[in-house]
Image (cartoon, rainbow, N blue to C red):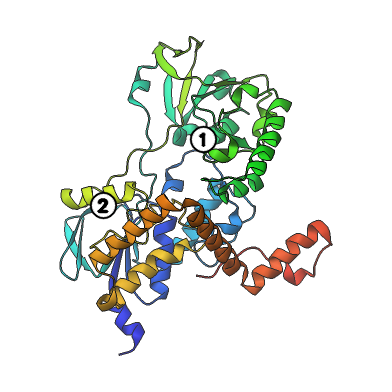
Amino acid sequence: MNQDTKKQEKRVAVIGAGITGLSNAVHLLKSGYAVKVYEKQSAPGGVWNNLSNSGSYLQTNSLHYHFASGVRWKSKHPDRAEIRQQIAKVCASLPAGVVEFDTPVERVRFDADQVQVTVQGREETFDGIIVATGLHQAPFTPPEYRSFGGEVKHFVELDTIQDLDQKKVVVVGCGPSAMEALRSLSSSAKQIHLVCDKPRWIYPSIFLYNLLIFMPWSRPNQWLDRRIHKVLSKHYHKFGLQHMMPATSPVRTNPGSIWKEFFPNSKQSHVHLHSHAKISGFDGRRIMFADGRSISDVDVLVACTGWQPLEFPFFDPGLAEVVQFHVTKVGYLYLHEVVPGYPRMVLANYKSGIGSTGLAPFISSILLQNALEQASIYPSKIQQESWIAQEKLRWASAPLVFQTINVFESFVQTFLFFSHPRRIFWFLRKMSLRYIGKLPSRFNYRPETSV
């Protein structure tokens, strides 16, 4: 019996047909496993399927947004329609019967060497399971917003707002979702207000964002700190947005939003910005702030307030509590994806939420394959907990060194990404268009990644 036949005998369940779930299913199928993907919705796509905002677009450069071979993007930042089209294309390429839609998982329990999954009243037996239900399961709207006298919409419901050209809209938030809402609504709303309780730095360039990601947060370079602050301050003053500047230094806080159109568009006569504005209550369609300010006659309140806490209703209460604790505590998972003592279960992409960049699509499936094929030498629960303890200690005692290691790993991933010859030709051609001239047409290559 050859190796592929042995693998084919092993069955793996995947919960969720978003990008993370589908990418892991692709890798497992190509490795010779029998895979079944359960999706509670009627279409693949996960969070991209939930968004009703047709103006949503990919904020990560599409060059890094790869999750299966054959995926090609038409632009650096494709919109929701193109992303959903590529997801559907990958899903359609899977063998018939691999993905079951409208099939919510009711229960998951673990026996000695098997995983029992209950769907639609029937119980299926698997050797391993990948949980890929995602970080963004359900939108969160503060309950106090219910007392507002007008319409209340979450960011994911932007396209459901009717007659925008006749309405006064207030967007609450200062993160990427709020910036996207402002971008989508500013061209059609009669009047739009952006309300920020705690303003974040809004970077006009993706380069600056990448630069800040690689900064050692514990000991930032003072010269670079001052330089970045000077550049950003100049940009804010240029557009008269001094009141939107956070009090913290750019490199001593988490990176903020990135929207290159924010600064020029903020000067439109129907766009109004309110910083350090904490909502204290509502009086009909009037929004009141803690410092005495208010906005009257508001028609629509758009809440860019994030997502509800993660839930795993298919686990028994005891296991659900353990999983939720490990997932919500950064670094509390073995190799960031495995709950100690449950090697046959991988929680895919709950640490970073970026399951389609770098080598992330490979990691979850490889971890599960190691557990299934090398069970005799797989680390014990004690060894897994020891790794977690060491991870926490490294973060606490030497954050600068550990951040440097993460930067090195990022460069290694970048090297592996560009090691493909066709990607090198693509990169050279992109550079030639700017600095040299066009390379031969045979190098006209759009980014593609192999699984």
| Residue 347 at least partly seen | no
Residue at screen point 55% across, 49% down? 216
Residue at screen point 33% across, 47% down? 329
Residue 306, image x, y percentages: 42, 36
Pointer 2 with pointer 1, Cβ within 8 A: no
Residue at screen point 59% across, 46% down? 212
Q: What SS does tag 1 mark?
A: loop
Q: CA distance from mark 2 to mark 1?
A: 28 Å
Q: What SS does tag 2 mark?
A: helix
Residue 379, image x, y percentages: 28, 70
> Residue 51 or 397: which is nearer the viewer?
397
- Indicate the quadrant containing the N terminus: top left, top right, bottom left or bottom right: bottom left
> Residue 183 or 398: which is nearer the viewer?
398
The extreme front residue here reads 397
Residue 78 sits above or below residue 35 on the image: above
The extreme bottom residue here reads 1
Residue 404 sits above or below residue 57 on the image: below
Label disc, if present, on residue 323 of the rendered structure: 2
The extreme right residue here reads 437
Residue 233, image x, y percentages: 68, 30
Query: Hey, what amino acid is under mark 1?
Result: Gly
> Residue 66 or 424: which is nearer the viewer?
424
Q: Is residue 101 left or right of residue 285?
A: left
Q: Is residue 374 left or right of residue 79?
A: left
Q: Which residue is mark 1?
A: 175
| Residue 265 at least partly seen | yes
Query: Hey, what amino acid is under mark 2?
Result: Val
Residue 288 sits above or below residue 170 on the image: above
